[in-house]
Amino acid sequence: MINLSTGAFYERSTSQIGGLRAQAETLQQQIGTGERLQRSSDDPVAAARLRMLARTDRISQVDTRNSELAEANLALTDETLGSIADLVVRVRELAVQAASTTLNDDQRATIGTEIASLRENLVLLANSRNISGHALLGGQTAGQAYTDNGTGIDYVGSGGVTPVEIGEGQTVVPGLTGPDVFNFDTANGPSDLFAVLSNLAAALATGEPMRSAPVPPRWANSMRAWKRSPPRRRLSVRGSTGSIS
């Protein structure tokens, strides 16, 4: 009995020493790596929480990138709209000049040539690119937003801009489409700025005097106001409970 108890004592002591050594090695490893959990079995609850936090962090990084891209695209849209406003104001000025009865046919034809050139510049602005290299005013279209079919300018982009997720339950629309910018209604029905400039340039090429404003005054005035004091574009965020700007 004495020998058995002594053997059990030594066996228990050896086991305890081994356990202490394992704990010491674990502590040394934690100190060396700076991590308390070496494997999930060390603390299953804490390990699960860490996995959840890591997933949340990855989603947050994606949302941050989406927000930065949306803000950059809105800034490019503002810059493009400012250039369009300058162009429209110039067309308006030329139309007023062309309406003067003191001009001859050649002078009106010269004005028409400039307006035709401005129309080409307008097409270039309409096909501006966003931060990803896609059509800035083409919605989800990767290529050009507008094409010349030989008789007019056609919009070939998509019908809208897909909202971008920037957080749980929150989205932002990162731009405009071409029709949002260039299309408007007239007394004769729907029209767009490209058609107006084309018709104006063609009429002046024949020396025909202007009898009315080629661009609807309300539309032109809004562009003029934009040029004087361009609004500061802000992200319009839509969430499950509503939207904020």
Image (cartoon, grey):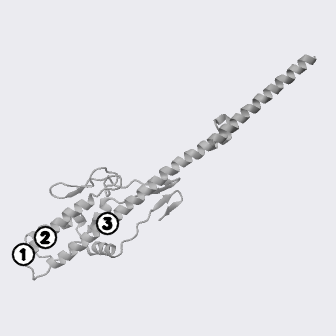
Query: Label 2 crowding class (10 Å Cα cut-off): few <14, some 14-19, many 20+?
Result: many
Question: Depth check: 192 or 1 in front?
Answer: 1
- Rounded to the nearest whole Å, what is the CA distance between mark 1 and mark 3? 33 Å
- Rounded to the nearest whole Å, what is the CA distance between mark 1 and mark 2? 10 Å
- Seen in the picture, residue 224 relative to 198 is either above or below; the reply is below
**Disc assigned to residue 105:** 1
Identify the residue under disc 3: 81
Question: Depth check: 220 or 40 in front?
Answer: 40
Residue name at image x 65 percent, y 37 percent: 29
Residue 191: x and y in percent read 24, 64
Dividing the picture into quarters, in which one does residue 103 lie? bottom left
Question: Circle 3 — which element?
Answer: helix
Dividing the picture into quarters, in which one does residue 163 lie? bottom left
Residue 228: x and y in percent read 33, 76
Q: Earlier in the sequence, mark 1 or mark 3?
A: 3
Identify the residue under disc 2: 112
Q: Are marks 1 and 2 in contact (CB under 8 Å)?
A: no
Q: Earlier in the sequence, mark 1 or mark 2?
A: 1
Residue name at image x 9 percent, y 75 percent: 107
Would you say 178 lies left or right of 32 here? left
Would you say 209 lies left or right of 15 here? left
**Disc assigned to residue 2:** none
The image quadrant where one finds the N terminus is top right
Residue 174: x and y in percent read 40, 58
Disc 2 marks which amino acid?
Answer: Gly
